[in-house]
């Protein structure tokens, strides 16, 4: 089975938006074991849209379109696909009802052109749009499968995952489940080498490696007849991967290091504060990205100048003079200082040179000292990263969280 | 003139990455007045790649490819395009030299397979890749124009802007210049209404409106024979837009509010510190995203708990009790407290309810008080934004910067 994605929208061709729908749908199809051979973007132009659809009908088993389902005259996807597959459009009363209710809910009156959205190809499976007005749908015809999804990503993604993926399960031979195993402290290549034999030996579940800023993860995906069966197939493989990777695994199906650390702090009934120099508030920002962080996070100090390091955190002038602001000693005094002054169980100190300027031969750009003061002792690490200011800062913040995670996990 | 973009890369079809190159190139072509009729993504598969290229040769005047220029065997873009246009690949000595130098610079030895990247279609214009190894190129043949760019966005974008756009200038009838006018404090609709008549009346330069998180901007683009001529056409329009929008314009061709505020602080020889509650370090992070912020930014305090507000910032217990942590009074004491304790000319205090929980009828989610203590006085603003935690936080941080900007500009 192979699929072709067709995005219909002049705004993509003008570069006003990026085609993120294609990524979401491709990921889902990849998990289903359905190959995507082509992604095409075409504008709201009847002739070119028709050409693209006929070409896809000719070369793909599954056609998935995004966009062009709206109420205006230049929304032509349904009309063009119906024509290509010799299908009539018929009014779907339930969808019309849903659209009217949607407008009621936001306190507006439905204008007549919105009815257009409720006309759908005869005999199709309707995918209710709980996130907007245009219903989506799928049908089988001439041995081909067609799915039409709305363009806005906040509608396209949930409809695809909730309705279109299950519609495709029979083609993929059952249902699909995945688990993500997240790691910190191991590089992508090292992870792949460690998992190479296991990955090679597996067909179902499959193991797919991914990398993101200073982290990597694998997604383990099983196909089975039922969800329970898929879950039973996944469980031993998740365990195998965790055993092989070891402590570098920080969580399964979690969002981020900051989330895991937050849960560990709550579980241990501990509080946290941070003192940041080169990360400049980034760690504090990441911790407070999560709603509910106030349960364990008391606050932080960004001590960008030496003066603030001394006055607010109590770093000693001698330490700064003898070892410099970028040193293990300063990081330790920052960590202890912030935990004492803010009265928390755990304190973090980060000091380094984020760059691009300010480096010396002895202390180059990318050098960062990170200290965690916890249970009356210091855990201090030095890191050196040369991938630019943003990555230096992000890596240092992640490393600080990872030290706490390893200590509490 | 119409163009077709072809991205070559299985990783896009698997959904591992999103095709941002297509957006950047489409934006540039739109500025040049070149229509993009199709964007296509195809994998590293020789047959399908050839089909897509021949189809594009048939229906487009300009073909721009991204990806598939690397050193490995499955990098086939050049070979396939050369074949489609009956061109030989020849070794480009200068590019080989560049590739060797690139490896020298990062302290590695060039492996032999990298030489492949220096073989380019005979007679092409070579676009030096200063950001990676694979050189890009452009040529004209059979009345069609072909441009090949590397896939990684950090290489594709600068090469496209520095070399490919000027290569296309003759097709667009001259050269292109743009200026971006950035605004804060005005919504996109209000901006469009104010500029409507001017936008309608202009053909060259054109004025295109854009919106991003809590900001909007317009791009003014002129086509002319020479750069100087374009500049002369732009100047009065930039002035007109600034006059119409007024104080909400915070800069022309600047990157961000934090950059403009940084420059104003340097110019006024002033220093800054911030005290953040609901933004949790985000403002500090944004200020220190910029290298060189240490010239004016001394540091900040994230006072997530009331205890930290009192102990570190000196907010009075009575104030917290009488008015609450989320109040104009608390924001003002935070701003003054941080500026006094950190010894800076300007102090910022931000306190609010970022959500999604923690709101009450009196103080709903999204309510934020922002105070700037500057030249011995407070400028305090209240804002209410219901677009979710991230936007509430970002808007509050931007508003704080904007208050300083208006005071100093």
Image (cartoon, coloured by chain):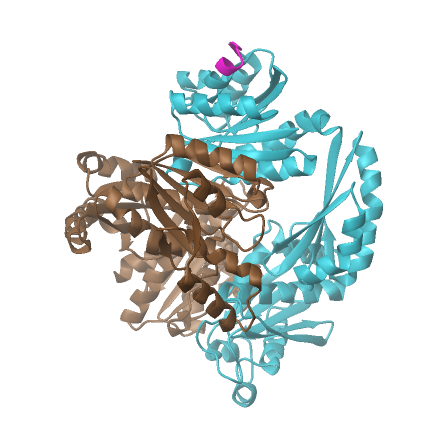
Chain colours: A brown, B cyan
How many dots with numbers?
0
B162 shown above or below A383 = above
Identity of the residue drawn at 52% across and 71% down:
A106
Residue A391 visible, this orientation: no
Q: Quadrant of residue B352?
A: bottom right
Identity of the residue drawn at 69% across and 34% down:
B32
A38 shown above or below A81 = above
- The percent coordinates of residue A303 (x first, y second) are 53, 62
- The percent coordinates of residue B183 (x first, y second) are 70, 57
Q: Is B200 left, or right, of B310 in this rendering? A: right
Residue B313 visible, this orientation: yes
Q: Is residue B171 magenta?
A: no
- Which span of residues is magenta-colored? B82-90
Q: Is A191 left, or right, of A299 in this rendering? A: left
Viewer-proximal residue among B306 and A54 = A54
A169 shown above or below A155 = above
- The percent coordinates of residue A119 (x first, y second) are 46, 55
Identity of the residue drawn at 45% across and 71% down:
B356
Q: Is A64 left, or right, of B241 in this rendering? A: left
């Amino acid at each position: 089975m192979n699929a072709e994605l067709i995005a219909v929208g002049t705004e993509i061709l003008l570069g006003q938006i990026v085609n993120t729908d294609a990524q979401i749908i491709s990921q889902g199809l990849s998990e289903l074991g359905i190959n995507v051979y082509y992604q095409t973007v075409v504008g709201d132009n009847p002739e070119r849209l028709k050409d693209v659809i006929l070409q896809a009908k000719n070369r793909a088993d599954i056609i998935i379109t995004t966009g062009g389902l709206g109420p205006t005259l230049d929304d032509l996807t349904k009309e063009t696909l119906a024509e290509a597959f010799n299908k009539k459009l018929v009014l779907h009363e339930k969808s019309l009802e849903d659209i009217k209710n949607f407008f009621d809910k936001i306190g507006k009156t439905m204008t007549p052109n919105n009815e257009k959205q409720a006309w759908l190809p005869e005999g199709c499976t309707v995918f209710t749009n709980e996130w907007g007005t245009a219903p989506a749908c799928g049908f089988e015809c001439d041995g081909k499968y067609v799915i039409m999804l709305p363009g806005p990503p906040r509608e396209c993604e949930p409809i695809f995952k909730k309705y279109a993926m299950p519609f495709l399960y029979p083609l993929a031979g059952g249902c699909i489940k995945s688990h993500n195993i997240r790691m910190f402290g191991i590089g992508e290549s090292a992870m792949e080498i460690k998992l190479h034999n296991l990955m090679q030996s597996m067909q179902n579940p499959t193991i797919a490696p991914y990398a993101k800023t200073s982290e990597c993860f694998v997604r383990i995906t099983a196909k089975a007849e039922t969800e329970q069966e898929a879950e039973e197939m996944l469980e031993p493989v998740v365990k195998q991967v965790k055993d092989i990777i070891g402590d570098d695994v920080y969580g399964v199906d979690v969002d981020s290091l900051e989330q895991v650390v937050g849960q560990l702090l709550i579980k241990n009934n501990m509080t946290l504060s941070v003192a940041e120099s080169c990360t400049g508030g980034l760690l504090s920002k990441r911790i407070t990205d999560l709603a509910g962080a106030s349960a364990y996070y008391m606050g932080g100090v960004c001590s960008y100048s030496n003066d603030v390091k001394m006055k607010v955190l109590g770093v000693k002038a001698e330490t700064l003079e003898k070892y410099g602001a970028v040193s293990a000693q300063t990081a330790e005094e920052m960590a202890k200082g912030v935990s004492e002054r803010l009265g928390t169980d755990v304190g973090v100190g980060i000091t380094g040179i984020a760059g691009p300027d300010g480096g010396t031969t002895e202390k180059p750009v990318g050098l960062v000292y990170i200290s965690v003061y916890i249970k009356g002792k210091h855990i201090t690490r030095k890191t050196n990263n040369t991938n630019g200011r943003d990555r230096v800062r992000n890596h240092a913040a992640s490393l600080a969280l990872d030290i706490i995670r390893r200590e509490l996990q």
